[in-house]
Amino acid sequence: MPLIPPKPKPEPKPESPYLLHSQIAKFFQEFVTDPFEKHEATKAWKREVATQNWSYQASLIDNGRSSFSEPKNGLSPGDLVLIYCYRYMQMHTVSGFHVLYRNLQDRKLEILRNPVFIDFGCGPLTCGISLAWYNLVVRKHKTPSAPDGLRVHYIGIDRSEAMLAHAQAASLSSGLFHSKATFDFISRKNLPTLLPGYIKKYREANGNKELTVILNCSYYFGSRTLDVKALVSVVKNLLTEHLQDDKVCLVYQNATHPAVNEKWEEFKKGMKALLPSVSDDYEEIQYHDVTGRKTQNNPQTIKLRRGLLLNTAWSDHLAKGNEK
């Protein structure tokens, strides 16, 4: 009599305190924990990382706000990215998933139909992983979408070439994305010239159908070098010249401290006419860390500010749905 295979272990519920979906946990083990904990024991790595405490490591990357563009104390930009991943990436992936999932639950914001995900300050693909996790949860009963991975047009924008290189490697090898998913990565300085062309390419690839556009800003407005007026100009041009008839939302998350949200307030004022704010929430969520914070007491706590801006096309779409 053939052996009956055991039933797969059920995935964790998508609620705080968050436990990672098994496929997301596998990603973090292979792309974050193993590379950090098995890093080549160079003199610089032993001196600056392996023998140092968390506070010192955090100072190397300015608590996550480094440019990640220049070597430091013998560590390459890639080494600094790896420190960031080990200490911050899971936390930000969890909060990114939480924001997307709460927008679905609270606002009925469905984002997986012809999605174009424009990730400002994409880092090492942090919110790309959040979106893949969201896809696993939302489409778990649908086939063949879930087994084939997330199908998305993703644009990652960052000032650090080392971050972009890490993000590209994750997009190619994580196993979380559909074979027809596309990934394009842009340095911040090339954003105004390249972004419109990518939108045109995606629209043609989708048979000129309506796009679902998510502008994602995860901890982006905490950047010390962000030029808010330039960003407002880029987004306004995008909305008025290239996405006039598409549903567009902007999803925001950051820490709750007022100082890191000042640029966000400036941006909202500049975009008020085209992307009005529909929610602005402060909350605490928890998660179980499996990377750099796992030696601390789990669950970890995230103090989060999250916001949502919607253009008229998306607001009208939601209003029609509520009328049914």
Image (cartoon, rainbow, N blue to C red):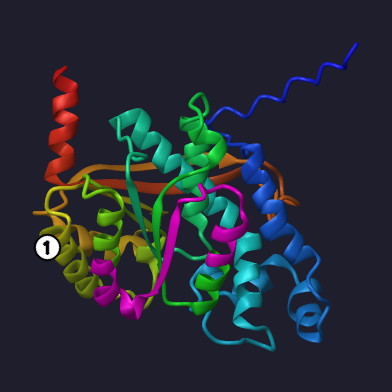
Q: Image point 41% across, 42% down: which residue?
A: 99
Q: Image point 19% across, 31% down: which residue?
A: 318
Say if 147 sits above or below 257 in the image.
above
Say few, some or many: other residues with alpha carbon within 10 Å of mark 1 (under 14 / 14 to 19 / 20 or more): few
Q: Position of residue 242 (x, y in %)?
A: 16, 60
Say if 231 sits above or below 119 in the image.
below
> Image quarter for residue 274?
bottom left
Q: Nearer the viewer, residue 284 or 308?
A: 308
Q: Is residue 172 magenta?
A: yes
292 to the left or right of 70: right
State the residue position of label 1: 241
Q: Image point 36% across, 76% down: which residue?
A: 188
Say if 15 sits above or below 263 in the image.
above
> Image quarter for residue 147?
top right
Among all residues in the image, which is located at the extreme top?
Answer: 1
Q: Position of residue 202 (x, y in %)?
A: 30, 57
Q: Is residue 44 visible?
A: yes
Q: Is residue 299 visible?
A: no
Say if 142 sits above or below 177 in the image.
above
26 to the left or right of 281: right
Q: Which amino acid lies under the numbered mark 1 shown in the image of this protein?
A: Glu
User: Considering the image in quadrants, where does the C terminus appear?
Assistant: top left
User: Considering the image in quadrants, where does the N terminus appear?
Assistant: top right
Q: Image point 55% across, 87% down: which residue?
A: 70
Q: Which residues are magenta?
A: 168-197
Label 1, secondary structure: give it: helix
Q: Position of residue 7 (x, y in %)?
A: 74, 20
Q: Nearer the viewer, residue 226 or 255?
A: 226
233 to the left or right of 84: left
Q: Position of residue 54 (x, y in %)?
A: 69, 66
Q: Is residue 317 magenta?
A: no
